[in-house]
Amino acid sequence: MSGKCSTGWSVAAGLALTVLGAVLAPALALAEAPHPWQMWMQPAASPVAERFHEFHHFLLILITCISVFVLALLMYVCVRFRASANPTPSQTTHNTLIEVLWTVVPVLILVVIAIPSFKLMYYMDRVPDSKMTIKVTGHQWYWEYNYPDQGNFSFNSNLLDEKARKPDQPRLLAVDNPLVVPVGTNIRVQVAGTDVIHSWFVPSFGFQTYAVVGRLNEAWINVEKEGTYYGECNQICGVNHAFMPIEVKVVSQAAFDKWVADAKKKYAANPPAEAPGANPTQVAAAETAPAAPPASAGH
Ligand SMILES: [Cu+2]
């Protein structure tokens, strides 16, 4: 299968999937959350997610071609060489040309897959010219968000109580304090954990990074459209694993600046409760600034 052909097909398939998605998802304009009977993936909202989708379509075409080819070969052999049509079977045991081909061709296919795969892996790993950093900390069972570049304030983000939920807020996805980020900005997202392994997963951002105790994992987002995006912890982390959703509000820079001014006051007056065990925010601060005073023992 030539590269040109596969690119053409993956573009065509991508278009077909997009049209199908648009037909199936009329309720939520460019849905940022999963919805009933959804097929395919949530629409891409970041450059990384767009590349994920392209790579997925390319692989889907490739594996479909391989499966159809193998199925056709099998069917041909079953029919052409069945006992009644071929009473005296061939005694051939070796064919050098075919053996070389069935070794070399799969290797070449793997190389064709590996090159864009590695390119994508490095692309999602390297934060291009980040304008700000957000620190995400997984707790049993909620997320803590920290804004080191905006005065280092932090807050906890918990599943919204059913009684507090408004009709337009999705059940089990809406939270009390969503993460707020500016639109169209390269944002470095650092992810850590305090108790067990969690995973910060927002499908439309193409972002899924493990929150591991004692480690600081990193990836980046640049959300192209304002809106509310939802995700979930996707590493089984205990009894309330299903109840630590992620809500991200993507707003204009001006709205973000205003939100930061308000949030600084709101969360300074009411800082997040200290989780049992090490607080990785303090660990990270101590690592970057060795002269920092030791963390105070209480509030
Ligand atoms: Cu979790």
Image: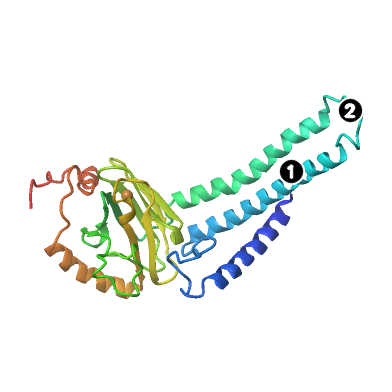
Name of the residue lying farthest toward the left:
298
Q: Cα distance, mark 1 to mark 2?
A: 21 Å
**Vertically, is 136 above or below 290?**
below
Q: Residue furthest front?
A: 84
Circle nearer the N terminus (1, 2): 1
Kind of element beneath mark 2: loop
Mark 1 neighbour density, 10 Å: few (under 14) some (14–19) many (20 or more): few
> Is 168 on the left-hand or right-hand side of 96?
left
Examine the image and state in which quarter residue 91 appears.
Answer: top right
The residue carrying mark 1 is: 70
Three-letter amino acid code of the residue under disc 1: Val
Q: Residue visible at 42% across and 52% down?
A: 208
**Disc 2 target residue:** 90
48 relative to 61 in the view: left or right: left
The kind of secondary structure element at disc 1 is helix
Q: Amino acid at mark 2?
A: Ser
Q: Is mark 1 within 8 Å of ligand 1?
A: no
* Image location of residue 115, percent across then percent down: 60, 45
Which one is nearer the viewer's eye here, 194 or 150? Answer: 194
Q: Position of residue 255 (x, y in %)?
A: 30, 75
The reply to whether discs 1 and 2 touch (Cβ–Cβ < 8 Å) is no
Specify the quadrant of the image occupied by residue 56: bottom right
Q: Residue at x 56, y 47 (%)?
A: 117
Q: Position of residue 222 (x, y in %)?
A: 42, 62
